[in-house]
Amino acid sequence: MVRLMQLVVCGLFLIALSPNVAGRDDRVVVSDAEKDSHGVLVHIVKSSYQSGSTDIRVLLPDRMEKARRYPVVYVLPVEAGRGDRYGDGLSEVQKHDLHNRHVAIFVAPSFSHLPWYADHPTRSEIRQESYFTRVVVPFVEKTYAASECSEDRLLLGFSKSGWGAWSLLLRHPQMFGRAVAWDAPLMMNEVGLYGNRDILGTQTNFEAYKVADLLRTRSSLLRDKKRLVLTGYDNFRHHHQQAHTLLDELKIPHDYRDGPARKHDWHSGWVSEAVELLLGIPHKGLSVP
């Protein structure tokens, strides 16, 4: 009974999992972990929600207590596969030792197609939202000492993945606790921009993921505490300013930084502050509004 109450209080989101198999409506097999040359644990995934193989990379704190459950920061990619034109978010986390400084688990999934964190309306092998929420998150919580509380499921992204982080939280407000977007096109109004048509398919499908509309429809669920984080920019300052204005109009509390301007890349210096804001830790030298 105590365990049942814990699951209810923490807002557990799990599907039926058998050894190496996740989900009844998805055919998925996840390999055992192998350490890469940087000490990151890598699982290879085959899922009918994705085309071909993808992977889940896991960076654990060096020291973990047996009875403790840890918050998980999902480092959401902006490129398909292991593309690194804009750097590698997990390597940036490791470079700054954020997994040890904050004693948290960091997880970086990959996707077979350009990640927009949405399900295609007709193509079953492009179901990115379903893959992330039904396969990646449940697998991490089943396999590692990850907290099952929604407030400890944290989303970190920029550009496409910043948009994805916010849309995932807004579409699943009971599943995720906080989301940060850095230099993201949050106020897009139509399908067809930045390669998103191949993932979202149609304008009708896009409307279901449109951040501005989701903020309006979910506003009553977002007023109790700060769950959205909006930091600096390179290409999309105007989007951030508009999003900040809308959040204020809707009386949604949030953390907002209008800058500084940085290069549109994982390694331009924004990640450490974003992680601290996600975890509710005031960044050194800055006051959190």
Image: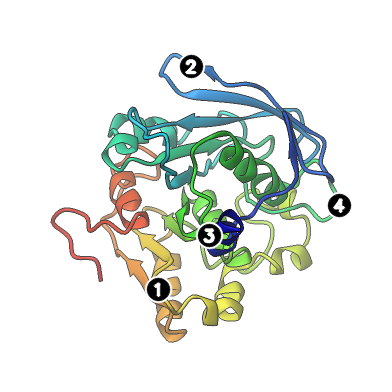
Q: Which amino acid, by three-letter code, is at mark 3? A: Cys
List the single residue furthest toward the left.
285
- Dot 1 or dot 3, earlier in sequence: 3
Closest to the camera, between mark 2 and mark 4, is 2
List the single residue furthest toward the front.
1
CA distance for labels 3 and 2: 32 Å
- Dot 1 or dot 4, earlier in sequence: 4
Residue at image coords 45%, 36%: 86
CA distance for labels 2 and 4: 36 Å
CA distance for labels 1 and 4: 37 Å
**Residue for badge 3:** 10
Image location of residue 163, percent across then percent down = 53, 57
Q: Are dots 1 and 2 in contact, CB under 8 Å?
A: no
Image location of residue 106, percent across then percent down = 44, 38
Q: Quadrant of the N terminus?
A: bottom right
Residue 93 relative to residue 126: left or right: left
Check residue 225 in the rendering and tell me which mark sits there, or answer none: 1
